[in-house]
Amino acid sequence: MSPISTSKMSNFRWVICALLFIATTVNYMDRQVLSLTWKDFIAPEFHWTDDDYGTITGLFSIFYAIANLFAGKFVDWMGTKKGYLIAIFVWSTGAVMHAGCGWVAMQIEGYDSIEALRLVQAGSDAAVAIATISVWLFLSCRLILAVGEAGNFPAAIKVTAEYFPKKDRAFSTAIFNSGASVGALAAPATIPLLARCMGWEWAFFIIGVLGYVWMGLWVWLYEKPSQSKHVNKAELTYIEQDEDMEKVEAEKAETVEASEEKTIGFLKCFSYRQTWSFIVGKLMTDGVWWFFLFWAPAYFSDQYGYSSDSGMGIALIFTLYAIVTVLSIGGGYLPTYFVDKKGMNPYIGRMRAMLIFACFPLLGLIAQPMGEYSAWWPAVIIGLLGAGHQAWSANLYSTIGDMFPKSTVATITGIGTMAGGIGSFLINKGSGMLFTYAEGQGSAFTFMGFDGKPGAYMIVFCICSVAYLVGWCSMKALVPKYKPIVVE
């Protein structure tokens, strides 16, 4: 008996979900290699200052935000299989190219070895020249990395809409989205060791090559559900259950089927309140995740003296992201409970779940005060905040599939992710400026009983804590009830 004729449902959709999880993990690891190697390994060779590194990371956020504006449309245009394949090829190539920046800088500046670059007197004209050319080289690689990485989430969300019914999308999105947390866990545990044992160039190269391996798996395994030899009739029926329900409710199957094939013009997308709901949700909350991703190691170092390469520093960061990873997956199941057990439609159930998750970050208000007793308190609290974010994010992405036809899912995802990139730039750049100012002011800078830099951290924690409730209320005001868009 062939697999397609058996009554037992296959579960190939979870294999696809696993591929999305792996891609997201590699995506975040590629992005983190620079932040984990620049201070101890790269800066001494190229004479970078904090300002040089800030220029690279700040412009990366802008590159990423702009690329996201077009990435979704590109994926919709190319199709899921080709679009995802091209995206991961571009970002993996950009990641690998970082490894050659030292050699290119050496050739341009006329030095015989990397060691000769390192021995140049700090502060000299030669050192400034080396720093300048190397910053431009790394910026070029970061641009390529950003353009490719921008395609990950639009493509992954489109695949989720293809392979999962609406009630399961938040759960499947939570699983692959947890790759961000796993990447954040795996990066500090592996990248500094690779850089120390083999050189920072090999850290970029090895992590980048993982993307090429994934490409081989994608070509081998992915096809649309209706065309996949791994998906039997029972699973295909399960995947397409929403389409069947829509046909019955609308009583005009031809119209629904035709509208699913049509796409919405890029500028036309901005005329829908549903688009702006997603934009606001991303703009208000994505920066919170990126703030803790970029600043948590510095926070434990500044406030408690635990450097990122110390045993205690590693333990704190690992614990934080372990909490995020474990708890965020369960968060994706909550809307399924509301739909199956409470009888809510997918959008109402999702918004109810998101309101609950928007309350988790309020714990951030006590992270700094509790840190007076032990560094473990803010580590655990920030972990819970991060778990709330990941669960929120999984459901936020799934609202696109609730409201828009599949042909436009990736476009809307790209627009929203662009907004999230802008929010990330604002909060991280703003935080850096605030921390520098507060540190210079010392005890003259006070906020809620904390002086100097601790006061600045408290301000940012407060902003992060209320951002989700503000985002949820704005989304609810824009789209108060379930209203899917049908293309005529």
Image (cartoon, helix red, strand yellow):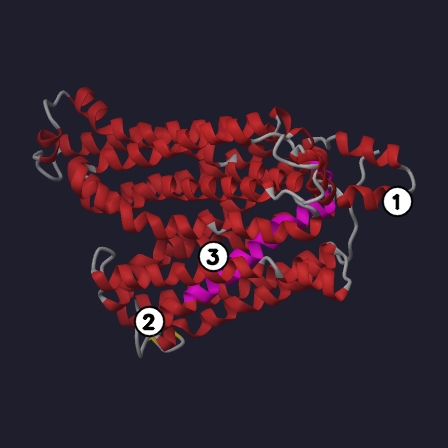
- Element marked by disc 3: helix
Q: Which residues are magenta?
A: 382-406
- Residue at screen point 76% across, 30% down: 261
Relative vertical location of residue 296 with respect to residue 269 in this rendering, above or below: below
Q: Which residue position holds label 3?
A: 288
> Left or right: where does residue 190 sit relative to residue 379?
left
Query: Is residue 429 visible in the rendered structure shown here?
Result: no
Q: Residue furthest front?
A: 1
On the image, which quarter does residue 132 sit in? top left
Relative vertical location of residue 187 with respect to residue 118 in this rendering, above or below: below
Say the numbered circle drawn on residue 248: 1
Q: How many marks?
A: 3
Q: Which residue position holds label 2?
A: 376
The crowd level at tag 1 (other Cα within 10 Å; few <14, some 14-19, many 20+) is few
Relative vertical location of residue 481 with respect to residue 370 in this rendering, above or below: above
Q: Percent from the top left, x then y, of residue 248?
A: 88, 44
Between 423 and 20, the one nearer to me in the picture? 20
Q: Percent from the top left, x then y, of residue 260?
A: 77, 34
Look at the image and tell me in which quarter the N terminus lies.
top right
- Residue at screen point 62% across, 52% down: 170
Q: Percent from the top left, x then y, of residue 472?
A: 63, 60
Measured in 3D between alpha carbons, the distance from the residue under mark 2 to the one under mark 1, in whole angstroms, is 54 Å
Between 80 and 263, the one nearer to me in the picture? 80
- Element marked by disc 1: helix
